[in-house]
Image (cartoon, grey):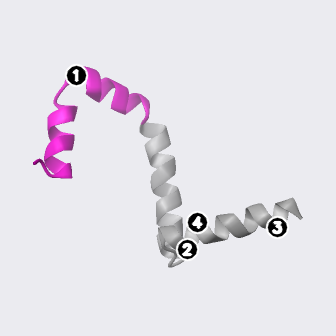
């Protein structure tokens, strides 16, 4: 079984895959910003999900 790093290197070695990956680079950069902000606030994925649920329920009134 390949590690994530090995799989990524293998996949990005394919020109077609690399081209599609590069088309999405802005989206990946945005996701990285969200993840960094969440980490800077000390939030976990579970904590972020709970906060989202509270916002949804509050919006429903």
Does residue 55 appear left or right of residue 50 in this picture? right
Asked if residue 13 lies in the magenta stretch, the reply is: yes
Residue bearing mark 3: 58
Earlier in the chain: of badge 3 and badge 1, it is 1
Residue bearing mark 1: 15
Residue bearing mark 4: 49
Image position, residue 10 (x, y; %) = 14, 36
Which contiguous range is marked in magenta? 1-24
Earlier in the chain: of badge 2 and badge 3, it is 2
Earlier in the chain: of badge 2 and badge 1, it is 1
Name the secondary structure under disc 3: helix
Image position, residue 38 (x, y; %) = 52, 68
Asked if residue 2 lies in the magenta stretch, the reply is: yes
Q: Which mark is residue 53?
A: none
Q: Residue 47 carries which label?
A: 2
Spatial CA distance of label 2 from label 3 is 17 Å
Image position, residue 13 (x, y; %) = 16, 30
Spatial CA distance of label 2 from label 4 is 5 Å
Query: Which secondary structure is most common in the magenta stretch?
Result: helix
- Residue occupying the point 27% across, 28% down: 18
Name the secondary structure under disc 1: helix
Spatial CA distance of label 4 from label 1 is 36 Å
């Amino acid at each position: 079984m390949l590690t994530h790093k090995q799989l990524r290197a293998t996949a990005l070695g394919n020109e077609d895959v690399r081209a599609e990956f590069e088309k999405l680079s802005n989206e990946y950069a945005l996701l990285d910003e969200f993840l960094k902000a969440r980490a800077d606030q000390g939030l976990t994925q579970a904590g972020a999900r709970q906060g989202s649920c509270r916002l949804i329920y509050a919006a429903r009134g």
